[in-house]
Amino acid sequence: MNTLLRTTAPAPKTPALPVAGHSPTPKPPFIKRGTPQFIRLTLALFSAGLATFALLYCVQPILPVLSHDFGVSPATSSLSLSLATGLMALGLLVTGPLSDAMGRKSVMVVALLLAAVFTIISAFMTSWQGILVFRALIGLALSGVAAVAMTYLSEEIHPSVVAFSMGLYISGNSIGGMSGRLISGVLTDFFSWRIAVGAIGVLALAAALMFWRILPASRHFRPTALKPRTLAINFRLHFRDAGLPLLFIEGFLLMGSFITLFNYIGYRLLAGPWFLSQATVGLLSLVYLTGTYSSPRAGSLSGRYGRGPVLLVSMLIMLCGLLLTWFDSLVMIFFGMMLFTAGFFAGHSTASAWIGRRARRAKGQASSLYLFCYYVGSSVSGTLGGFFWHSFAWTGVVVFIAILLALGIMVAQRLRKLPELRAI
């Protein structure tokens, strides 16, 4: 019996050898919160966001200085920012799809390096036309960072923490916008605007090199053919979605409101009855620190209450902050700027994360379309605000921004009613 049992016992199984051409390729894991890759990615994109928005907005607090030095009006001076954001918007229509074909990291690195170099060169320009040309080139180069970074995050980060990571990235944007304004405002008061702009360019160049070195390579990127027909098909699909076109409109209204307030608040505070110095106006950029808190916080609240309610409340907070700037008290104006800034970054963070969630294909193109509308809002509204300032002073600017925010609240209400958008 024992002999029979021994002879009839099944032989141990040996693992089957993989058949050539049929071995399964495991899907690479997403980057999770708390891992070394997450820390590297967060630092890299934080530095990229900081450099990008320091380069883009460093001229905003010195618009009155540029008006004086080159003998141009406030609306014409604002072109140094509006041209940069306008060319950035146009570039997004190309760089987003380009990254779908060539890869995310390479496009971002080249774009950030070029923008830093163009900024350094712009500090040596002696003509207003030369300033505008290089500001346009800076905006065009930076288009390779803005939409691609959002797409990279939506592809590489675990879906459960995409909203949180997007908030961290946008908080880097807020610190970058603050740093660019703060450095240029203060250094211009003590030295000159050329030294201020050149210093920001050098710092951005260092940030670009660090970004190149520490950003993890894409693991979930799958190249798609860069064909006009494919781009047109994806374009139509994005606009057939119930929510994406509304998010594109919201981006236009959010950024149009934000850039208009900060373009012209400096003109108001440099004049009577306050007659603040250029350095003090630059220090007011510290209100951007509220965005470093509100962006990731909005991501967390979106997971609890849904993106629709968070976006709607963010727009209402912006409106409350705007109305406070109507008062003549510096304390009320500063507090209003803080509320306005916190609401803006919370709203932008929420809408940005929503884009990656809704887009089923060509996420880079979808992000590009959102940011195209976002920066067109900056260019169009930022320049139009100059005419309201010239004709009706600060009251005209407040009324203009209030109209934009009222439209934004209506769009947010429509988005809130789309039940599928509430899923995380």
Image (cartoon, rainbow, N blue to C red):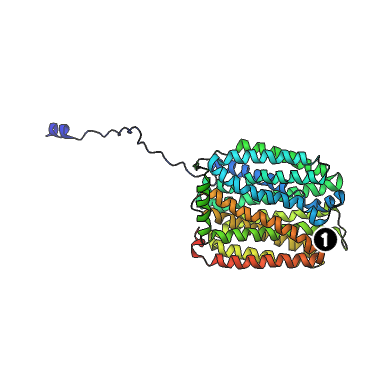
Q: Quadrant of the N terminus?
A: top left
- Left or right of 60? Residue 235 is left
Tell me the residue that label 1 is attached to.
Answer: 268
Q: Nearer the viewer, residue 106 or 13?
A: 106
| Kind of residue sitting beneath label 1 | Arg
- Left or right of 44? Residue 281 is right
Q: Position of residue 416 (x, y in %)?
A: 55, 66
* Label 1 crowd (10 A; few <14 / some 14-19 / many >=20): some
Query: Can you say whether 18 is above or below 375 in the image?
Result: above
Query: Can you say whether 349 is above or below 397 in the image?
Result: above
The answer to whether residue 148 of the structure is visible from this angle is no
Quadrant in the rendering for residue 204: top right
Q: Position of residue 51 (x, y in %)?
A: 69, 44
Q: Position of residue 383 (x, y in %)?
A: 75, 57
Residue furthest out toward the front: 229
Describe the element under mark 1 as helix, strand or loop. Answer: helix
Q: Position of residue 62 (x, y in %)?
A: 81, 51
